[in-house]
Amino acid sequence: MTTSFFPKVFLIFFLLISLAWESNAQGIMNFVEETHDFGTIKEGEIATYEFTFTNTGNQPIEIAGVKASCGCTTPSWSQGLIQPGQKGFIKASYNSKDRPGAFTKSITVRSNAKKDVQILYIKGFVDPANISTNQAQGQQYTPTTFTQPNTSRRPATFKIDNESHDFGLVKTGQIVRQRFNIYNAGQENLIITGFDRNCDCISFGLSSATIAPNQTGILEITLTGKKIMNLDESFVIYTNEAQNQVRTIRLQAEIIEDFSQHLFRPFAEGAPYGQ
């Protein structure tokens, strides 16, 4: 009994060591940067940036897929195995045609690395090529050149209670809302002149386009889960504020399939269950 006991102990010890080594044997995607700001680009321009990473782990990495949060962003990536010590890339191209204003887009990378889901971001501001054309095509962009009254009064000052909101998990078909308080800390009327967003899943309502000094207006943003996606959008607000006429609210959500819609099948009245 004593003779067979020690080999078993050594065998168990060896197996535990092997399992521990295998659990630590993974590739690691070490990115140079995870967010890239294009700055200001001209409308119609295709802005491209290549995120580079090094596999600092001890196993090869294979990228299973890359998905952008918007059809306006086209990704491409390293194919095949990225061996330990080798470099790989994720390239993102943003098409700014008919998309004036600020933007923030996410790129979701799935792989067999230790961090199996990696999210990268691109952002920037699209300078409109032709304001009158944009308005004719229904873009919600308003010229942002204003003259403040020539008085000693403090000009309109835009303040908002939250510059971002994460709706969290939203099922397809679900409608969720969030309210934001916009406060005018100036001594002149604050005028909301326009809004802009890229996703047609986002709608909005405003209590008043003109907010008097020391008063608050309510902006309600509605998100409708139209399709499965990782939403990461900039909701743009244009105002007559002298210092900063363009403000943004970052909206995020993970829209998932509502599987409850597929659990039961309709059946004729009086028919046996399951037919």
Image (cartoon, rainbow, N blue to C red):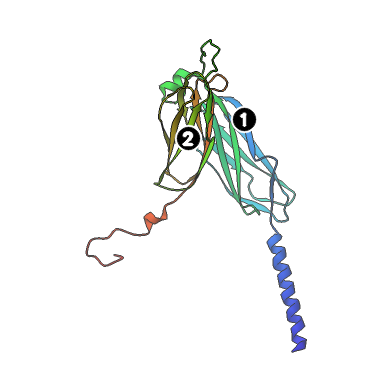
For the residue labelled by badge 1, is the local secondary structure a helix, a strand or a loop?
A: strand
Nearest the camera: 98 or 246? Answer: 246
Say which quadrant the N terminus sits in: bottom right
Q: Is residue 145 above or below residue 215?
A: above
Q: Is residue 21 left or right of residue 271?
A: right
Q: Is residue 268 left or right of residue 57?
A: left
Q: Residue 228, image x and y in percent?
A: 46, 46
Q: Residue 149, image x and y in percent?
A: 51, 12
Crowding at mark 1 (Cα within 10 Å: few <14, some 14-19, many 20+):
some
The residue at which mark 2 appears reads as 180
The residue at 64%/52% (across/down) is 115
Q: Is residue 208 left or right of residue 235?
A: left
Residue type, numbered disc 1: Phe
Q: Residue 198, can we see it?
A: no
Residue type, numbered disc 2: Phe
Q: Residue furthest left?
A: 270
Nearest the camera: 48 or 18? Answer: 18
Say which quadrant the C terminus sits in: bottom left
For the residue labelled by badge 2, is the local secondary structure a helix, a strand or a loop?
A: strand
The residue at 50%/28% (across/down) is 183
Distance in Å between CA atoms under marks 2 and 1: 28 Å
The residue at which mark 1 appears reads as 38
Quarter-wise, where is residue 225 in the image? top left
Q: Residue furthest top?
A: 150
CB atoms at circles 2 and 1 under 8 Å apart? no
Q: Residue 71, can we see it?
A: yes
Q: Is residue 133 above or below residue 151?
A: below
The residue at 63%/32% (across/down) is 37
